[in-house]
Image (spheres, helix red, strand yellow):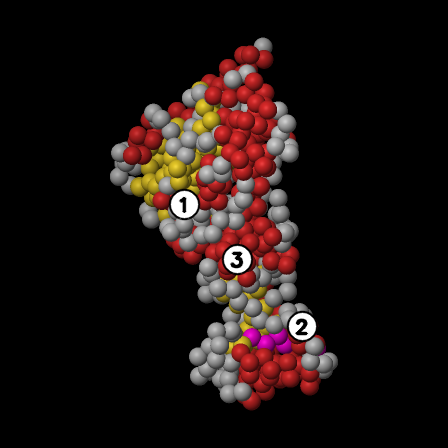
Amino acid sequence: MHSLLSFLHFINSDRYQYTESDVLLMSEHYQAQAVFEYFYRHSEDGGYTVVSGTTDVARLMHLFNNTDAQERYRYFSPIIHEKKILDYLCNLQFKGNIYAMREGEMAYEYEPIIVIEGDLIAAKILETPLLNTMNFQMTIASKANRIRRAAGRKISLFAFGSRRAHGLDSAILGTKAALIGGCSSHSSLAAEYIFDIPSIGTMSHSYIQSFGIGHRGEFQAFDSFVKTKKGQSTALILLIDTYDTLNIGIKNAIACFQKNGINDEYKGIYGIRIDSGDLAYLSKHCRKALNEAGLYKAHIILTNGLDEFLIEDLIQQGACFNSVGIGDAVAVNRSNPCFGGVYKLAAINQQPVMKISEDLCKTTTPHLKEVYRIYHQGKAAADLICLAGEDRDKKRLMNQEEITITAEHNRLAQTTFPAGSYHTRPLLVPMMINGELTDEVSSDSYRISEARDFLYHNMDMFSEEHLRLRNPHLYKVDLSGDLYQLKVNLLEEGRKTLK
């Protein structure tokens, strides 16, 4: 994949990270080895989210390592004026590790999605670029997946939201995230160039209007389009709601197809798009008219501010359509535009640390961790967050021994998996080891379509109750016994210092 990431992403940061780094450098605390984690506290619906952006984060750190000192100086010197920190940044090499969930993974609240293990300053200055990358892509991928769940697997979803996106990076990386989350294709030429996934498009109202107002101008627009594009790879999709969908538009479309010999024997895709009005009512009447004309294979594409709930309504009303075009719902996720991912310190020099807060959701879980998904009776049953080192529950998982997991905030809520009745899968994989990218993020091994297929495979391993859009069934995400006890001990230690 061609990299979008430039060195400017690193200085698209918050001043305090560099101010703190200067202080750390002067105190020589910069040599400390840190563990930071990226996770989120709440999802849009209380269910899972779709991971997108982890490979970009690993490549961003790789890009930093491979930017020479002279070029770094060119970027840093106008904004960093303290000589010692400037010299340090210009020669800094991240030799640490990045573990992360694969793109297309299904993640739950408070699970580490990315773990950064390495020099304190390098991990610290990554914070804002990482959050900027992950939070945007996570909310777009998750919204696209909600729309996919509403539409089902057979209906095609097109990401048509570039014009609604908040700038160039937003348009391109948002398209990528939408494709991972479940969109079938997209309309962005830039995204096609970057990701090598063909873009698609239909026609605009202004195109039709340019041929003149009314019945005659619309037919001429349709006729010119079909004559020019017939036999090419472009789908012959005619926009029929510019003037009057049922009295003019659908009649002109049928007449145009018949005049130009477009019927069910045509090898390409042909059909209509409706962009306004009562889409359920109009689509049913258009389907009837197309069928009466013998155009049974004509596609119907619906657009106009659609999201998962409107698509559910259309299906319940018996609307007739093959595809939907999604605009701002996936371009900016208008219902949840700000994803609540955070980046927190979990260990320093191999010693666990945590934030303690009166707000329970802001109390963090300490130390370097691993996450395992437990599958029981063919379905995902629970995720267990374990200590990365010695952990008795992790050992039980590896040996498929009987294990009982307990909810962190309700110690009476327990689930037991008998020995040999389950299998597990680690959710965090190495993406950078000792400062070098792994095969997981090499340009040859990464494909958006593979990430989407990976997501669909994961979805098939979850129950319908966990996948529903409204009030999804609570999925168990528990701490191992050793990790829970470590957290309790640190909380007690913190309380003692307050006394």
Residue linked to disc 2 = 205
Hey, what amino acid is under mark 2? Answer: His
Q: Are marks 2 and 3 in contact (CB under 8 Å)?
A: no
Left or right: 203 in relation to 384: right
Q: Is residue 127 shown in magenta?
A: no
Residue 165 is situated, as x and y percent measured from the top left of the image, at 62, 54
Residues under numbered marks 2 and 1 in contact, where contact means CB atoms less than 8 Å apart: no
Q: Which residue is drawn at 47% across and 26% down?
A: 119
Q: Is residue 7 above or below residue 158?
A: above
**SS under mark 1:** helix
Badge 2 or badge 1: first in the primary sequence: 2
Question: Which numbered disc, 2 or 3, marks the residue that appears first in the sequence?
Answer: 3
The amino acid type, in three-letter code, at marker 1 is: Val
As drawn, the residue found furthest toward the right would be 213
**Is residue 369 shown above or below 288?**
above
| In the rendered image, the vertical position of residue 443 relative to residue 485, given as above or below | below
Tell me where residue 466 appears, x and y as whole percent.
Answer: 46, 48
Can residue 110 be seen here? The reply is no
Percent x, y for residue 143?
55, 52
Region in magenta: 237-243
- Inter-mark Cα distance, 3 to 1: 19 Å
Q: How crowded is mark 2: few (under 14 residues within 10 Å), some or many (20 or more)?
A: some
* Residue type at tag 3: Ala
Q: Nearer the viewer, residue 197 or 101?
A: 197
Mark number displayed over residue 203: none
Q: Give me the C-alpha separation between circle 2 and circle 1.
A: 42 Å
Which residue, as the protein is rendered here, is positioned at the far bottom?
A: 259
Q: Which residue is drawn at 67% across and 70% down?
A: 277
State the residue position of label 1.
441
Determine the residue positioned at 57% across, 25% down.
85
| Residue neighbourhood size for the residue with mark 1, other residues' Cα within 10 Å, grouped as few (<14), some (14–19), many (≥20) | many
**Number of residues whose C-alpha sits closer than 10 Å to that of mark 3, classed few (under 14), some (14–19) or many (20 or more):** many
